[in-house]
Image (spheres, helix red, strand yellow):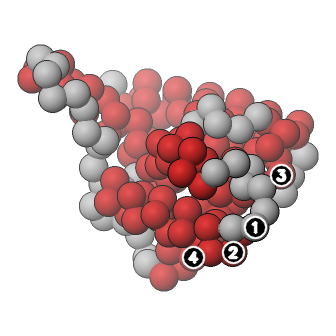
């Protein structure tokens, strides 16, 4: 696969995963670039399947987390410029609420949910990225969704 088409196909999916993991737009954008740069530098001669770039992104999240105590600058992703301002505000507010709630999930559940929500990987591929069984991934995603739903209901 050409790197350009690979990048175009996966960049938004990797960004969405990283945003869910970090809760920070700017950090996520930086980690997306670093993920693809490392993928190109280290695996230029090999096929670049989606799980590989997600594994690199996952490792970068953990590296960054080790280097920083926590992420303070949480922002919601940009929304359509032509939409109704009130609707934009409500969407941003809801996205922010979900991202903040995801930060309170246990790390393994947050990671599984973030990968599943990206819709770029199958449960089997998520299992490869995280190093657990496919059944365990399904359990983690289910628990994360239940916990997230409970957190969001408690806030309202």
Mark 2: few/some/many CA within 10 Å (<14, 14-19, 20+): few
In this orientation, which residue lies closer to the viewer: 47 or 147? 47
Instruction: State the image quarter where residue 40 is shown.
Output: bottom right
Q: Which residue is mark 2?
A: 42
User: Which residue matches tag 1?
Assistant: 45
- Choose mark 1 or mark 4, whichever is in front: 1
Residue that carries the numbered disc 3 in the rendered image: 128
Specify which label sits upstream in the sequence, 1 or 4. 1
Q: Nearer the viewer, residue 149 or 28?
A: 28
Task: Give the CA distance from mark 1 to mark 2.
Answer: 8 Å
Q: Position of residue 82 (x, y in %)?
A: 14, 22
Q: Residue at x 31, y 29 (%)?
A: 94
For the residue labelled by badge 1, is the local secondary structure a helix, a strand or a loop? loop
Q: CA distance from mark 3 to mark 2?
A: 19 Å
- In the image, residue 115 sits, relative to residue 28, either above or below, namely above
| Observer-nearest of 74 and 118 | 118
Q: From mark 4 to mark 2, how far is it between C-alphas?
A: 18 Å
Assess disc 4: are there few (<14), some (14-19) or many (≥20) residues with their C-alpha within 10 Å of its C-alpha: few
Percent position of residue 90, x then y? 21, 24
Q: Are marks 1 and 4 in contact (CB under 8 Å)?
A: no
> Circle 3 sits in a helix, a strand or a loop, which is it?
helix
Query: Dot 1 surroundings within 10 Å: few (below 14), some, or many (20 or more)?
Result: few
Residue drawn at x 41%, y 69% is 70
Residue at which label 4 appears:
63
In the structure shown, which secondary structural element does the residue marked by tag 2 occupy?
A: helix
Look at discs 4 and 2 and give the one toward the viewer: 2
* Left or right: 125 in relation to 56: right
Q: Which mark is residue 110?
A: none
Mark 2 and mark 4 in contact (Cβ < 8 Å)? no
Q: Is residue 75 visible?
A: yes
Of label 4 and label 2, which has the lower sequence position?
2
Measured as percent of width and height from the top left, residue 79 is found at: 25, 32
């Amino acid at each position: 696969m050409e790197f350009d088409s690979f990048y175009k196909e996966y960049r938004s999916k990797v960004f969405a995963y990283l945003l869910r993991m970090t809760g920070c737009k700017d950090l996520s954008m930086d980690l997306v670039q670093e993920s693809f740069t490392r993928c190109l530098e280290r695996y230029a001669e090999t096929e670049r399947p989606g799980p590989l770039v997600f594994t690199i992104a996952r490792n970068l999240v953990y590296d960054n987390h080790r280097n920083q105590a926590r992420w303070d600058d949480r922002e919601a992703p940009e929304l359509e410029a032509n939409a109704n301002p009130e609707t934009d505000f409500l969407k941003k507010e809801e996205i922010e609420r979900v991202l903040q709630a995801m930060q309170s999930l246990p790390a393994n559940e947050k990671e599984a949910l973030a990968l599943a929500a990206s819709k770029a990987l199958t449960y089997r591929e998520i299992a490869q990225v995280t190093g657990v069984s496919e059944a365990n991934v399904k359990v983690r995603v289910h628990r994360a969704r239940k916990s997230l739903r409970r957190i969001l209901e408690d806030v309202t």
